[in-house]
């Protein structure tokens, strides 16, 4: 059984990845639908405001902190190679690091940056907004699923 500091790290992994999954779930299930129903200029302005607020310490501590915990769990698992929970810990770490953090970096953030450079009331923004809502939400579903599955994998490592 996992114990000591390793146990604490794994519990932190469960909590962090689960919290991030919840944030992503909220966006996938109702925030993006609500924003998508607004006129494009309002949707663009609102999403830009949300993306700016998301980079504040409150969310970044959870999101980046979970990334650090998952990376540490992966490294410690490779070094210690425990009998219990080894596969679950490595799978959980890979799911979050690739499916949540990696997808954020290569799929969601570039779309956010493009949106932020646009004048919300411009015709260009109106055209981009429709594709943005659809594509961003698709990748957010991936992030949500990866984060939730990482949390489940870490829970399984504890059992």
Image: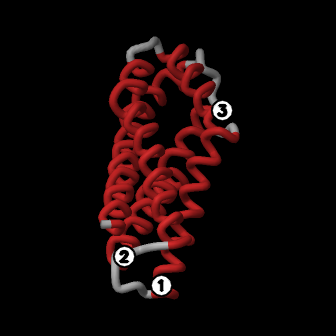
Q: With respect to residue 3, does 106 lie above or below? A: above
Assign the C terminus to one quadrant of the image: bottom left
Tell me which numbered mark, 1 or 2, is placed earlier along the sequence. 2
Q: Percent position (x, y) of residue 113?
A: 61, 40
Q: Are marks 3 and 1 in contact (CB under 8 Å)?
A: no
Q: CA distance from mark 3 to mark 2?
A: 42 Å
Left or right: 114, with 80 as reference point: right
Q: CA distance from mark 3 to mark 1?
A: 37 Å
Residue at 34% x, 79% y is: 84
Residue 78 is tagged as 1
Label 1, label 2: how far apart the Cα atoms are:
16 Å
In the displayed structure, 53 sits above or below 77; it is above
- Of residues 10 and 74, the one nearer the viewer is 10
Residue found at x 43% / y 87%:
81
Disc 2: which residue: 1
* Rendered location of residue 104, percent (x, y): 51, 50
Of labels 3 and 1, the one closer to you: 1
Residue 52 numbered mark, or none:
3
């Amino acid at each position: 059984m996992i114990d000591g500091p390793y146990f604490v790290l794994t519990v932190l992994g469960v909590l962090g990845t689960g919290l991030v999954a919840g944030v992503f779930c909220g966006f996938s299930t109702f925030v993006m639908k609500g924003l998508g129903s607004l006129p494009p200029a309002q949707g663009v302005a609102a999403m830009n405001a949300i993306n700016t607020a998301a980079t504040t310490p409150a969310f970044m501590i959870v999101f980046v902190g979970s990334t650090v915990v998952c990376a540490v769990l992966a490294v410690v698992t490779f070094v210690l190679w425990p009998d219990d929970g080894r596969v679950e810990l490595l799978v959980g770490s890979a799911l979050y690091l690739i499916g949540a953090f990696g997808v954020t970096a290569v799929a969601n953030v570039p779309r956010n940056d493009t949106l932020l450079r646009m004048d919300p009331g411009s015709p260009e923004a109106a055209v981009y907004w429709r594709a943005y809502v659809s594509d961003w939400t698709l990748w957010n579903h991936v992030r949500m699923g990866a984060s939730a599955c990482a949390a489940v994998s870490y829970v399984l490592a504890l059992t």
